[in-house]
Amino acid sequence: MHGILFIQDLAVILVVAGVVGWICQRLGLSVIVGFLAAGMVVGPYTPPFTLVHDVGRIETLAQVGLVFLMFSIGLRLSVRKLRRLGLSLMVATCGGALVMYYLTRLLGAALGWSSTESLFLAGMLMVSSSAIISKILQETGENHERSGQLAMGISVLEDVVAIVMLTLLNSLVQIGSVGGAPASSLGHTLGLLGAFVALAGVGGLLLVPWLLRRMSISADEELQTLGIAALLFGLAMVAVYAGYSLALGAFLLGTIVAETPHRHQVERTFEGMRDIFSAVFFVAIGMQINLHEMAGEAGLIVGVAVFTLLARSIATTTALTLMGVPPKDALRTGMAVTPIGEFSFIIAQLGVGAAVVPTKFYPLAVGVSLLTTLVAPVVMRRSAPIAEALLARQPRWLAAAQRQYRERLDQLQAQAKRNKLWQLSRKRFFQIGIEVLLVSGLLIFSGQMLAAAEGWLGRDWLFPNGLQVIFWVALSLVLLAPLVAIWRNCSALSLLYAQVSTSGQPQAARLARWVETVIKSLCGTAMFVWVFSLLPAEGNARWLLFASGFIAVVALMLLWRKLVLWHSQLEIELQTVIATAEGKMTATSAPWLQAHGDWNLHMIDCVLPDLADAQGRKIAELDLRARFGCSVVGIERQGFMIPLPPPDAVLYPRDRVLLMGTTEQVKAGKTFLGAVSGNTDSLYEEVLMESIKIPLRSPATGRSLAELSLARTYGVQIAGVNHRGLRVLNPSAEERLQAGDEVLALGTPAQISAFRSWLVEAGPAAE
């Protein structure tokens, strides 16, 4: 019976989400607002409209929705996307989050809240919702403006900030030191998080692409979907067992899959489930809200929402301006990143569930999200005149100071690019950091991995204490490759800095050797202290690891060349996986054309529905420029970009088409391309082959296939011709047909029937 009730609740959620989402779409509101409102209406706290009663089942549905939502968010983030966004935008995102953090802590102090309550409020407000912002940008057509691209980039990067903040708060709740956590505790938590992410990330980048490649070769799409879903829930549970949340595991798998060539296939496969369970998540969140509590805190909700709209705009604008973004774009971006969403709900739920903040925090998060989501589209559509009005009223000295600051910033960036030493060494520093986190992760989580293996195989597997011996020996051998990689990178940096620091000095060659030796000695000492401090200290594990280390040293001496080769191959494999692919048209990678608001030109993209009337037609046939005044300037198909497509380019279902023109022109073109009349039935399953004999005096007698042009006239393809026993498969266009020949025609029954009628129209009279 419990299973039936679960299905009943899921059916109610989907029906209500669909109806209310459609109403919101018709009213021009974000569908996420509709999902949250629908959940509050049919939830257990709003009789007599209550359709779902069991809080436990609601929480289960929310957790399932959270896994798919975090996976889809992770799919939008990858190393190559971070590289495209640039370091300046990453710094601006972190700076804006810090400004928002301190402003919110001041608000909490002004309200008389405790440090714990202020900390959770800061966590709720310092990150925006990429899911909500992406939908608003799409609906308002601002996703290809400079400010829209910056807003989408910041919202994606703030997902990373949210994951870090969620992990910190979760860890602080577990150790019971929320609000007054020392810096050492925060550093330890961040270090553990970095080690886990590196361990899961490197392992995933080596395993997941290989697994997806193997499944694409030997398994059909159904099994591939099952395999990816198993990986998704499996890594989510691994994160939970490691002491983190489901959100972190699902988010990590999304970022790993985003680095693979199979990303677009996975996106298509999970598109339906993502839409369904994202809606389930937001409706389930709304169901957990008591409208009476929300009404009782209406003043607080409105006040915090106003604070969020102003403070987030100020924080983001300030951070972007300091990074050299023009003031107008910075202001418009700041106004676009005000909505909060999914991560704010999760953080509020964490605090309320752990009883470290009052229950009002949950309706507070949802209420502020609703208000900011309602206001954001209105502000976004008017952001350009608002920004111009604010800039026109700024003092002249401030405008002059901004210009001088940007000029100085450009000079510093040019100097950094000319710094050859940094350009040569930064890649190795990055590699050392990743390898250090990987080794740390293996050592830190070795105890949990061993416990899991003992629960599966037993402590005395093969021989007494056999599993422990085998595990530590295997772990020591696994650690060899990254430790060798760290030492090789340190040696290369030692040589580089020794050469640079002694250049031009008397006896430079001898002095360089001494400097190199000193740097290597310091690096070796640091590596020893680091590894020794992470070794497990309980039981016989340390001694087993020491013995395993001795075996590893012997293996190192014997297999040095092999390890160097393996390290090089591993590095090449990882670089291949995360190789930059500039072939996708997204809201966070600037397209090949830039529309400019001063020219009243805008770009908007639309996806052709599966049954669109425009599918299968050429751009020239659609004649969008003559009809509406807009132009097709790009097509994204299956993840590949076709810039400035020619007039004879054909549009297919699910193509993402980029239109350019005035606001009215692109909106009219989008409406036209999305039109569906329902008269696009596929005849794929009716295609068949049929053998037809050419009678005497047939119109086809003595004519070549090129002259007949059967594909254009009747829609049939001649797959073979039998000249009195001589069979010709896939005949050429020059092949001539004679009376008595037998042709193998390919087409639908109606096409073949019409072709047969034409062939015999003069045949019976001749006979």
Image (cartoon, rainbow, N blue to C red):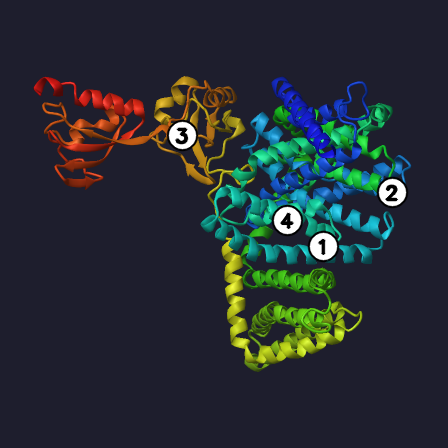
Q: Is residue 395 visible?
A: no
The quarter in which the N terminus is drawn is: top right
In terms of sequence position, does the residue under pointer 2 or pointer 3 come before the other? 2
* Contact between labelled residues 3 and 2, with CB atoms less than 8 Å apart: no
Which dot marks residue 193? 1
Label 3 neighbour load within 10 Å: few <14, some 14-19, many 20+: many
- Lateral position of residue 147 relative to residue 698, left or right: right
Q: At 57% across and 33% down in the image, what residue appears?
A: 272
**Which is nearer the N-term, disc 1 or disc 3?**
1
- Labels 3 & 4 near each other (Cβ < 8 A): no
Residue 17 seen from this side: yes
Which of the marked residues, 2 or 4, is nearer the chain's N terminus? Answer: 4
Kind of residue indicated by mark 1 = Leu
Q: Quadrant of residue 493?
A: bottom right
Q: Amino acid at mark 2?
A: Val
Q: Residues within 10 Å of mark 2 (few under 14, many from 20)?
A: some
- Say which of 724 and 170 sits in front: 724
Q: Nearer the viewer, residue 697 or 68?
A: 697
Q: Which residue is mark 4?
A: 252
